[in-house]
Each structure stands twice: as C-alpha cells, then as structure tokens.
Amino acid sequence: MPMRECVIDGETLTPEEVEAVARNGAPVALSLAARARVEASRGLVDGAVREGKIAYGVNTGFGYLSEKVIGAEDLVRLQRNLIRSHSAGVGDEFPEEVVRAMILLRANTLAKGLSGVRLGTVEALLGLLNHRVCPVIFQQGSVGASGDLVPLAHIALALMGEGEARVDGKRLPGVEALRAAGMTPLTYGPKEGLALVNGTQAMSAVGVLALLGAERLARMADVAGALSLEALGGTELAFDARIHEARPFAGQIAVAGNIRNLITGSQIADRAVNTRVQDCYSLRCIPQVHGAVRDVLTYVRSVLELEINAATDNPLVFPESGEILSGGNFHGEPVAFAMDFLGIALAELANISERRIARLVNPQLSGLPPSLTQEPGVNCGYGILQIVAASLVSENKILASPASVDSIPTSANKEDHVSMGTIAARKAAGILRNSQHVLAIEFTCACQGLDFKGVEQAGHGTRAAHASVRGVLPPLGEDRASWGDLIRLREHMESGKLLAAVETVAGQIH
C-alpha cells in the first residue's frame, strides 16, 4: 500500500511523521496555508531590498561582519558565499535517515512563513526528500548556535548543485545528483542562504529519532526486567499498586503495572512471595528506575514536539507588521538540555540492566548454573556477555557527561555563548545504541535462565517474550560465537516484533 503523505504546515509535525519520512520514505507536500504564508514573508524581504532598508542577513554581512552593508549587486554572491564558506563539516557522515529528518525539519520551519524564502526554495527541499536525494553531511562542526550552521550548509550546498549527495546509495557530485532527480540547481536570493543554515534542525533530527528509539527501548526494558525477575526467582510483592500510588510518579505507576501484567499467572513469582522478604534493588526498584526514565522521555518529547514546529532562524520576517526582527531562536539550549537528559536517562536504563545481567550469570546470586551453561568449565557460557555489557555501560557513563554545560565563544566573540546541542544529541544517540545492545544481552541471559527455571511456570507475558526471543535465538548448549545472536536479537527488538508478540498476550506495554 502507498505510504500516507506527510503534509507540512510549520505547526503540526509530529515525531512519528518525522520517522515515517526519514526512515520509511513517506512522501511530503506543503500545505496550501503554508504556501500563502511563505509567499507573504518573501514579499516583505523583496520589498526591503527594493527600498534599500538595512536588514541583517538580507543586505549585511554575517556574525561579527553584521555591521557591513552589502550592495544590491552582491546580494546573490553574499548568499552563495555563505553556503560555500560554512560547508566545513568533518568526521563521519550522518546516516541517511538523519539527513532526511534534517531536511524535513528545515522545510517545516520555513513553512511557518517567518523566514522570507521563496516558495520554490521550500519545494526544492521537499524535492530532495521525494526524489531520495541525500546530501552528504558530516557529523562534526556544529556548536549549536547560531544553530547548526555547518551541517545545514551541506544541504544548501547540494541544492546549489555543489558538494556531494547520494542517489540510490551512489555518491555523486551535487549537480549530478540533482540531474538524476530531474532537479536544477538553485541560485539563492537575498536572505535565502541564511534561512537554510540558521536553525537547530541537525540536533533536532538526531534527537527525534533517538527519542523514538528510546521510547521503544524503555518499553522493552520492562519486558526484559520481568524476564530477569522470573529467571532469578524474584517476588511480585514490590509491584503492588498500593506501593506506587503512595509515590505517584506517572512513569513509576506505568512500569509497575507493566510488570504486574507481564508476570500474571506466574508460579515462580507466586511461590517467591512465601520465600523472599525482598529482592535486590535491580529487581525491586524496576518501577522506580525505569519509571524515572519514562518521565524524562515525556519531558524530552515535549521539548522536541515544540522545537520541530518552531521558527529557529534569524532574522524573522513578520508580514503582518511589516517588520524584520533579529533575535536568537537559533540557540539550541532547550534541545541541548533535553538531549543531555535523554543520554543520562538511557545510561541509567542500561546500568540497571547490566546489574541484572551480572546476577543472572553469577551462580552465587542466581541459583542458576554458572554463566548459564549446563557444562561449566568446558563451556564458558554467557559470562562474557556480562563483560560486554560492563564495557558498554562504562562507555555510556563517559558519553553521559553533559555537553550543554560547555560553551566556547565563536565569530570573534559576537557569538559568545553557544549550546553544543548537536554534540549532546549525537552523544544521546550513541548511548541509545549501546543501551540497545545491553538490553539484547539481558534478553539473551534472562531467556536462558528461564529455560533452567522452567518457562512453563512463567507468567503469560514473559512466556510470550521468551517464545519471541527463541524464534530468533536458540538456547545455548555448546558454546558458540554470540555476535551474530546479538545482532539478530537487536534487529528483532527494533522491528517491533518482540513487543507485538508480548502485547498480543499481555496487553499494551505502556
């Protein structure tokens, strides 16, 4: 079936629509209302040029050169040189899905009609998306104010027919990539180059995709925690609704409810009520820790939902009043804080998961065979997976150090405080990847432990999770290389199939 078209208007874009366009290739169009707003704001810029009014970025230099007035004969050259000079990214390339998200978010910002660009410039951005032209953008070089100048310049460079872009996976010079898509290079008019680079769309693009992955991972962490609870013979007492209503954080209440639903019908947890007074923190405090992560994700979503529909360039053009006003909406501090918080929350989700993994492979703590193998000694079992998890969570702790507390003045001290928001977003995405691997390890170990404990005695939801994992990952008998197992399981988790299998039996994992 054809994918639903995403119609942007600068006001109502959702993270889920960003993912549909970025990852699934959904087509994009501009709303009629947005078209009218874009044309009205462009009319104001054209009028200012005709009348010789001085406006930053329209007929002045940029940054510390903002006091230098540019003559009418050089206005096109001014914008062209801005894009060329700022296309200075270094490091690894952004993945295609991030680049596509970046283009969509930039187009959505321009669709608000406060940027003063031509309608054809917005349509050219949508052309890149709809024709699957992916500019080559490098991950390093942005300090997060004046927005993501460097990565966004590489998009604008490709639209000029310069730089490089990928079409059907093939890396081409920019002009050839446009030609392959039936597009022609743009020549930017007054303010247009600045409008394309001045904003927070790189950090927001990385952030939106990381948020959605984090939300999925948080739900799967509850499933993994429930599996570990049963594999370790834990008690259900700590998940009693009355405990969590006495400290009514929304995330905590939701997670406790998820665990109760997942272990409904469990003989293991039921027997433990009479033999265990209380469990270790990594089991007993799953609602408190996983729930706190959920509450962070709620905050991060609120920031990103606002930011992806905001005008983040400078100056802003207000056709109603006829004014062109300079401000600082390009400053990425709100997103920078949110991305640092996201990274910290995900690091903690992996931390507590690693503690459960460590218990599962330790016979002194688990009551299970050493390293979850029937023949310890000749077989090493899954002990090494705890070492891998320890490596990943240690790396997370380094990555979770906040980027937003740093600022280095730029542009001859005109831009004397910056957000480092794109660094924060990239770090959060890295922590997400590490945490996905850690959770895959917990699923691997917990299912092996439950095999020894007796999966037929587990709860309805945990049995469904076990069966879903076993569909891609056979039990461990003789030692085998685990790297392929972990890749398959992580892909199975990311596909949504594991959650779907569990929710069919246990109801929605909130």
Image: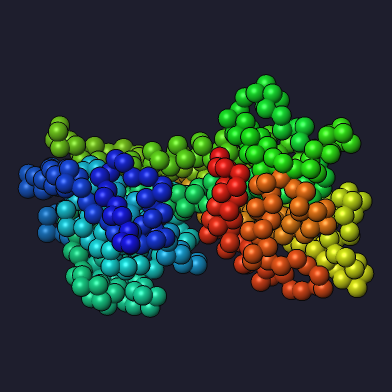
Q: Quadrant of residue 344?
A: top right
Coordinates of residue 189 in the picture (x, y in percent): 17, 57
Residue positioned 29% across, 46% down in the render: 109
Q: Is residue 38 visible?
A: no
Relative depth, front residue between 344 and 266:
266
Seen in the image, is 405 located left or right of residue 132? right
Q: Is residue 74 visible?
A: yes
- Asked which colour scheme the image uses, the reply is rainbow
> As displayed, is residue 316 above or below residue 168?
above
Relative depth, front residue between 452 and 412:
452
Residue positioned 71% across, 45% down in the render: 459
Q: Quadrant of the C terminus?
A: top right
Residue positioned 41% across, 47% down in the render: 15
Relative depth, front residue between 388 and 471:
471
> As displayed, is residue 94 above or below residue 205?
below
Residue positioned 76% across, 52% down in the render: 456
Coordinates of residue 482 in the picture (x, y in percent): 72, 70
